[in-house]
Image (spheres, rainbow, N blue to C red):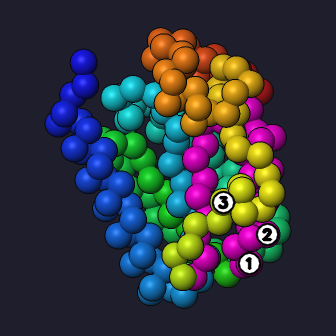
Amino acid sequence: MIDEKFVMEILQSREDRRDKQLDLINSHKSSLISFTLNTPGIVKDNEMYRDIHKVGLSEIKDLLIQSNIPILYQEVIDKATGIEGYLVVDFDPLELKERLIDLEESHPLGRIFDIDVFDNNHNQITRKELGINPRKCLLCNKEARICAKERNHSYEELQKEIKILWQNNKLR
């Protein structure tokens, strides 16, 4: 059963995120990284997700520092609909997206990371635009969007896999 109140919260959160992105881009006139998590179900904020977000944000910042990419602004917003991280950087958005895709694909928790990159005109840089294949499902080899649309996996299966990935990351 769909919780209509939660659906409305998610939709409002997306609209608020878009407004925040526009404000940051308009005020800084630079590339923007918008970082959230890909999480199943209606629980979007719990201790595990907050910890995974901290790891992901730390990895993003480390990548930026190692690449000598200046961080002009950063902010984290805790919400019931999931933590949101924003980093404004002075760097080419296409190359930035490529580097962040490498992070998503190489990090053990990368499949849970949702790292969006926007140019200074609020155009989102996509995998397709870079000639990179769409993201794979957390559990199988199909495209993630297809599995989500077809509901190929239960919430419990997805949640179990996220917990396994998190436990394995903590053991590293």
User: Of helix, strand and loop, which one carries label 3?
Assistant: loop
**Which residue lies under the disc numbered 3?**
126
Residue type of the residue flagged with mark 2: Glu
Between 43 and 70, the one nearer to me in the picture:
43
Neighbourhood count class around disc 3 (C-alpha, 10 Å): few under 14, some 14–19, many 20 upward:
some
Q: Compute the Cα span from label 1 to label 2.
A: 6 Å
* Mark earlier in primary sequence (1, 3): 1
Query: Where does label 1 land, which residue?
Result: 92
Q: Is residue 88 left or right of residue 91?
A: left
* CA–CA distance in space, label 1 to label 3: 14 Å
Residue 95, numbered label: 2
The mark found on residue 82 in the picture is none
The answer to whether residue 35 of the structure is visible from this angle is yes
Q: x and y percent of residue 7 in the render?
A: 26, 38
Residue at left 57%, top 36%? 145
User: Of circles 2 and 3, which is in front?
Assistant: 3
Which span is picked out in magenta?
A: 91-120
Question: Relative to 107, is 119 above or below?
Answer: below
x%, y% of residue 37?
Answer: 52, 42
Kind of residue indicated by mark 3: Thr
Q: Is residue 108 above or below residue 99?
A: above
